[in-house]
Image (cartoon, grey):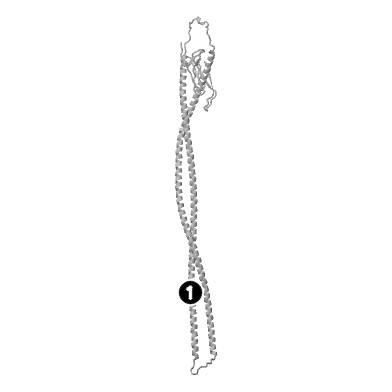
Amino acid sequence: MKTSFPSGLKLRPDGGFSSGSASSFGVGSGIRISSGSVAGFGGGRLGFDTGFGVGVGGPAMPTITNVQFNQGLLAPLKMDIDPNIQIIRSQEKDQIKVLNNRFASFIDKVRFLEQQNKMLETKWSFLQEQTTTRSNIDAMFEAYIANLRRQLDGLGNEKVKLEGEVKNMQGLVEDFKTKYEDEINKRASVENEFVILKKDVDAAYMGKIELEAKLVALQEEINFLRSVYEMELSELQGQIKDTSVIVEMDNSRHLDMDAIVAEVRAQYEEIANNSRAEAEKWYQQKFQEMQVSATQAGDDLRNTKSEIAEINRMISRIQNEIEAVKGQRSNLENQIAEAEERGEMAVKDAKQRIRDLEEALQKAKQDMARQVREYQELMNVKLALDIEIATYRKLLEGEELRISSGGGTANIRVMSSSSSSGGTYGHVTNCITQI
């Protein structure tokens, strides 16, 4: 009876199978397959001590009957033994061990990659949710940035408005300054006029005093002259009464001395009266002129004093207005400085936040691109692993068909001694027990 085996497998003289070719899948992976015939044909078993087992068995064979054979066949045969057979068998055993190790490593790698695939699917779903969340955060950041820009525009408009108000206030301040300078000039001119008028008033007052002194002196002189005149007149009258005048004259003519004396007296009295009247008239005229000048000077002095008082009140009022305008200007300058400082701080804060948001968005985009690249790489790895898994699955199915058709039973046990989850495969100790 002939038994057909899959391509690549050979029947060894000791009843096992050997593979003439070896395939390498991945780094550190290997396949080891051993098969042996047993005395009884019950069932075959392919098992893994990790909890996964597949039983493969052929159909139960009928009992063995007596067979007639040629006794000559029991004679010993002379066969030439190849001295290299042991070396070939040891090489085949080593090759089978290597293939078994690769197969066990491949199975462990398949399981690890399945776990990695699940983990990556979970991570991908999480990243999709995170992407959605980040999109909401981006919208919120954009709204916040738009709000900050609106606030910045409002602050800019307010700054422009305040600059216009400052310019208006500066114009008002310049106008008030011009008015203040004009008032100062007017005050200086009025003070100069006041000084001049004061000098004139002082001169008029001194002239009045001098004229009054002269008037008093003239009145005293008039009184003195009047008294002297009266004394002289009385002395003259006394002399005229007490003096006897002897006049030698022509007897042919008689002189009336009483009439002459009376005439002379009348002339002197008339002259004295005229002189007294003229002096009194002149003194009265001068006195009236001096009184008019003094009255006019007093009126001018009062008018000047009232004008000076009015100018002083106006100056004090203008000074108060200037002080108030200066206070308003200082307050406005302080408010403008504070507004500019707040605006600059708000602009700096907004720019800093915009830079932070842009950096965060750039970092998020970079993370997203990196995660997309990682996902693509993992999908490529997954696709390659799916292809390898499908290939190994076909090999395993072919081996199971071979075992079921050949009646041999193989027990494959994979024992994992150590493993690591960081991408490094652990050492795998594989043990195949032949039944």
Residue 242 screen position, x and y as percent: 55, 90
Instruction: Please name the residue shown 47% across and 58% down the image.
Output: 178
The residue carrying pointer 1 sits among few (fewer than 14), some (14 to 19) or many (20 or more) residues within 10 Å by Cα, namely few
Q: Nearer the viewer, residue 396 or 336?
A: 336
* Residue type for callout 1: Glu
Looking at this view, name the residue that lies furthest to the bottom: 252
Q: Nearer the viewer, residue 115 or 274?
A: 274
Please say if 12 is above or below 419: above
Q: Nearer the viewer, residue 298 or 398?
A: 298
Please say if 377 is above or below 96: below
Instruction: Please name the residue shown 52% across and 78% down the image.
Output: 218
For numbered disc 1, what is the local secondary structure?
A: helix
Instruction: Please name the residue shown 45% across and 38% down the image.
Output: 138
Residue 312 screen position, x and y as percent: 49, 62
Looking at this view, name the residue that lies furthest to the front: 250
Residue 53 screen position, x and y as percent: 49, 20
Residue 303 screen position, x and y as percent: 48, 67
Please say if 172 is above or below 295: above
Please say if 393 is above or below 244: above
| Residue bearing mark 1 | 289
